[in-house]
Image (cartoon, grey):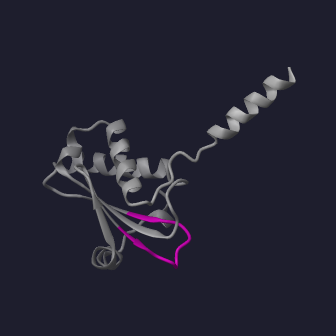
Amino acid sequence: MQKKYRLAKREHFHIVFKYGKSVVNHQFVLYYRSSRHIEHFRLGVSVSKKIGNAVVRNRIRRKMKEIVRLHKDEVARGYDLIMIARKPVTEMDYHQMEKSILHILRKASIINIGKKNTHRKSSTLSADETTT
């Protein structure tokens, strides 16, 4: 994930924890706070030592960041996000983790899923079919 999308400083984490809102599901906790001074979102990821050793924690962290990176165009701008992994995430594969992360972002009303170009493709096909 590019540097501009990272939430890295301890004081920024504390501000989001103190003044932000939270949403939970079985696998993740999401803290979020609107931040007017940024034109994109910033993400911080936390995986506790309770979840596993360093190899397991880093693998989970990388997957979480990659999922958000792939959906960054759908994530609302102007938010600081902190995503915390819970224990059940160790038993999930990539697609289950992606589904769970998108669920928690949707629950917080931070992501716009379903507004892809599917309508344009179907209207293009019908226009081509009518000309032949």
Q: Residue furthest right?
A: 131
Vertical order, 78 against 49 (above or below): below
Going by the image, does 68 lie left or right of 127? left
Quarter location, residue 28: bottom left
Residue at the spot 40% in from the left edge and 49% down from the top edge? 102
Number of marks drawn: 0
Quarter location, residue 56: top left
Q: Residue furthest left?
A: 50
37 inside magenta stretch: yes
Q: Nearer the viewer, residue 119 or 87?
A: 119
Going by the image, does 60 lie left or right of 68? left
Q: Position of residue 40 (x, y in %)?
A: 53, 66
Residue at the spot 43% in from the left edge and 60% down from the top edge? 109
Vertical order, 55 against 16 (above or below): above
Q: Position of residue 94 (x, y in %)?
A: 34, 38
Q: Nearer the viewer, residue 68 or 53?
A: 68
Q: Looking at the rendering, in which quadrant would you find the C terminus? A: top right
Q: Position of residue 15 (x, y in %)?
A: 33, 79
Q: Position of residue 34 (x, y in %)?
A: 44, 73
Q: Nearer the viewer, residue 30 or 54?
A: 30
| Magenta-colored span | 32-43
53 inside magenta stretch: no
